[in-house]
Image: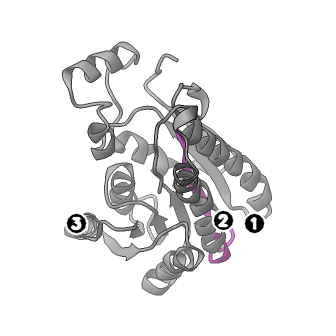
């Protein structure tokens, strides 16, 4: 139980990678705030699973891109569990289009949630952390793949990587560690809905490009998060860990 007596917030935790992270942190003893924007039933299901397994969790609604709601997410951790030690910035959206297809609305949607939301929640969470806290940003391999059609999403994840490096230095005097994880393709509800995994053609094309021969799972990322959140990584900060099964680019 590496995270006993720790309190964690996971944004965008109603499904996919976020749900897997929330479950893994709770399994290591953390009390977890399961944040969601609109999927209340899914978030409550994640909480129910954690509680059934003997853990502690609560679902908290909040749009990370709105300052008041970002503050409410951080305040909920203190109100429900008495503190805040670990923040996992997982909330994110993506849209794919070539340059001609980029609109002001699509740009703002991605950057408001993926970048501004991360900053707002981190600001509020860090203000409530004791020295020795931990921030983990879920970025993406898209920040370095340079894939045509990923202009806005790639730019947003570049920003997330940059934020990780800057805040690692800025918060080091308080012994607050800041790290990022850059996953390759992970099999989730979203990646299946987008057609990246889940059909024979997509699976075979993806497997051909990954040395380990499979898509990642939320649990693959969650295990890295638990390492970064625990004392096992006390001297690790300012890092972006690539988890892609050695995906050929």
Residue holding disc 1? 174
Whole-percent x and y of residue 14?
Answer: 32, 61
Mark 3, other Cα within 10 Å: few <14 / some 14–19 / many ≥20 = some
Q: Residue at x 30, y 65 (%)?
A: 39
Query: Is 137 contained in the magenta span?
Result: yes
Q: Is residue 180 visible?
A: yes
Label 2 with label 1: CB-CB less than 8 Å: yes
Whole-percent x and y of residue 149?
Answer: 51, 30
Q: Secondary structure at mark 2?
A: loop
Looking at the picture, the colour scheme in use is one colour
Label 2 with label 3: CB-CB less than 8 Å: no
Residue holding disc 3? 45
Extent of the magenta region: 126-140
Q: Which disc, if any, is residue 132?
A: 2
Relative to 199, is 195 on the left or the right? Answer: right
Image quadrant of residue 41?
Answer: bottom left
Q: Residue at x 61, y 55 (%)?
A: 115
Q: Which disc, if any, is residue 154?
A: none
Query: Is 128 contained in the magenta span?
Result: yes
Mark 2, other Cα within 10 Å: few <14 / some 14–19 / many ≥20 = some
Query: Please, is residue 181 above or below residue 4 in the view?
Result: above
Mark 1 to mark 3: distance in Å? Answer: 35 Å
């Amino acid at each position: 139980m590496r995270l006993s007596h720790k309190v964690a917030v996971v944004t965008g935790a109603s499904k996919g990678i976020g749900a897997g992270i929330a479950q893994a942190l709770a399994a290591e003893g953390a009390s977890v705030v399961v944040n969601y924007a609109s999927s209340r039933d899914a978030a409550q299901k994640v909480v129910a699973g954690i509680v059934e397994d003997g853990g502690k969790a609560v679902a908290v609604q909040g749009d990370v891109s709105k300052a008041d709601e970002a503050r409410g997410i951080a305040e909920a951790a203190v109100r429900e569990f008495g503190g805040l030690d670990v923040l996992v910035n997982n909330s994110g959206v993506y849209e794919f289009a070539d340059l001609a297809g980029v609109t002001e609305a699509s740009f703002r949607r991605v950057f408001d949630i993926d970048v501004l939301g991360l900053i707002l929640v981190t600001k509020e969470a860090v203000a409530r952390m004791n020295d020795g806290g931990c921030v983990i940003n879920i970025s993406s391999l898209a920040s370095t793949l340079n894939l045509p059609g990923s202009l806005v999403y790639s730019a947003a994840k570049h920003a997330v990587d940059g934020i990780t490096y800057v805040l690692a230095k800025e918060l080091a005097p308080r012994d607050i560690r800041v790290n990022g994880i850059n996953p390759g393709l992970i099999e989730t509800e979203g990646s299946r809905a987008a057609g990246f995994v889940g059909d024979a053609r997509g699976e075979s094309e993806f497997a051909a490009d990954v040395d380990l021969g499979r898509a990642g799972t939320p649990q693959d990322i969650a295990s890295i998060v638990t390492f970064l959140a625990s004392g096992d990584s006390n001297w690790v900060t300012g890092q972006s860990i690539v988890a892609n099964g050695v995906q050929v680019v």
